[in-house]
Amino acid sequence: MVKKITVAVFCMGLTALAFAQDENRARPRLGILPFSGNADGGIAATLLSSRPEILEAFTVVPIPGDAAGTLITERLFRMGSFVDSDIVAGIGNMIGADYVIAGHLRRMGNSNIVIATLIEVGTLRLVAGYHRRYRTVWELRGHIPSMAKALVVPMSGPPPGGRVPSLAVAPLTIPAIIPESPSPRNARNDDLDTLATILAIEIANSGEYAVLPRGSVMLAAFREWETRVTDERLVAVDRLLDFLIGILEFPDEPPGNFEELAAVTEVGRAAGADFVLSLETRALAATNMFVARILDTETGDPVAGIQREYRGLADGVNLMAEIAMQLDDDPEAAWRIDALNRHRRRANLFANPTRFWSLGVSVGSALNDPWLIGTVQGTLAPLPFSFLRLGFDVGFLSGLEQAGDRAGYFSTYPFAHLAFFLPFEILPIPISGGWYLGAGGGLMTARYDFRGLAVSESGFLADFTTGFIISNIIDISYTMRTDFSSFGSRVSAGFTHRFRLRER
């Protein structure tokens, strides 16, 4: 009998092991590259690789720490802020991954921006992307959960019905063909590459095109095309003739020229795309003009085009989502842009996990007078990692008694606390909520009634409080109250509603 049980247990173990291996084989292999830009990039990649959303969708492939790892770092440095799917796919083949997440961090005015992309190695396609602004590394950690969800969502959804057209993204580092064409002297190449990557992310996330940001292949094709244009005088004559016969006239389209369009379609064909996204910036008096066109690769005909002005990089980043909507030629684009701007204003306050906005009620005790405390409170969080709590306590029940008669008791205590808030989302804790620690004070007014005799007292008290928000529902706290001549305590537990807004 023991032998049969042993054999059965052994077979069950083999079956479970085989099932686990099959499950691992079914999940695609993912390489997460250290984010380039600054020292926080390694932290972002490490935190992302441990997120449950990533681990459930992929088998994470470790990045080697030997000479191959050094080569990977060098290639990432070459890529800069423009996501080059040729470079990323080459790294993916090197480590044996089906997908690769590449990211970049960079300074943007008085804040920073994080950009992350998911590249499919076999097709060189930008599957999904994510970008958010942040100020500190702690705020960056707070964006990791939403980043993981955004990059995994396309993998968990149903496969698209039918083939979507492919769109190559021409990097803005391609120089202009015509020497006299204006160039954005006041805009850095890093800024332009950042804008090009974010626009590619917005278009990829819309699902209208299979985006191919093949920068290396397109630059090589451009150089080959440029070598064929050697006689500047012939180019000038051709340009004059083209102008006379009206080839350069593109009514209702953003400004451009024939040679630039020819170069863009040339590199689009080299990237193997149905369409190519032509990007251009022009320096104006106090602003920059961003021009985006989608061209048919074979004919060079413009399919869609838009031009918008922006002042700085931060303004340009916000503009890319609007440009992506307008390039889709959606009749509801104006309405969607208005909705997006409204969402941005709300998300700035309510989508960030480091900001705790709430309203709640709780029940507690001072373990003395009053023995029962009911509380209504709310928190305001205009700044990350902190909140202002405003509340109102009502106390009942006194412990004073004489000859079997208990004194009546009633108290009110409006209070305000300023607290530091550490969200669980930025820690390796699989629940939402957070821990807080703060201080403040309020005005205590109490009334005792004993055998017809009423006694009132009031005074200001200082509070020192700490507590936990569990799953954004349960609030458990401890508060020490003092008038600096005596000390009291309050413990409470209750329900809270956290006002949250999903990031898009």
Image (spheres, rainbow, N blue to C red):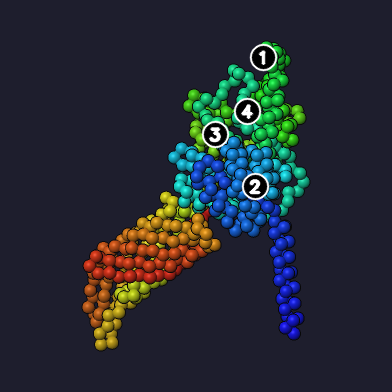
Report the side of 272 relative to 82 (left or right). Answer: right
Residue at the outermost bottom position: 403
What's the residue type where badge 2 is placed?
Val
Q: Position of residue 366 (x, y in %)?
A: 34, 72
Q: Is residue 443 above or below residue 115?
A: below
- What label sits on residue 276 in the rendered view? none
Measuring 54% from the left and 34% from the top, which residue is drawn there?
191
Instruction: Say whether disc 3 or disc 4 marks the residue closer to the N-terminus.
Output: 4
How many neighbours does mark 1 have within 10 angstroms: few (below 14), some (14-19), or many (20 or more)? few
Mark-to-mark CA distance, 1 and 3: 30 Å
> Which residue position holds label 1?
232
Indicate the amino acid at tag 1: Glu
- Quarter the N terminus occupies: bottom right
Foreground: 315 or 385? 385
Residue of label 4: 174
| Residue marked by disc 3 | 190
In space, the residues marked 2 and 1 are separated at their CA atoms by 43 Å
Look at mark 2 in the image and give the residue it sits on: 100
Residue 452: tell me if it is visible.
yes
Q: Secondary structure at mark 3?
A: helix
Q: Amino acid at mark 4?
A: Ile
How packed is label 3: few (under 14 Cα within 10 Å), some, or many (20 or more)? some
Q: Indicate which disc, 2 or 1, sits on the residue closer to the N terminus.
A: 2
Q: Earlier in the sequence, mark 1 or mark 3?
A: 3
Q: CA distance from mark 3 to mark 4?
A: 13 Å
The local secondary structure at tag 4 comes to loop
Residue 272, image x, y percentages: 74, 35
* Closer to the eye: label 2 or 1: 2
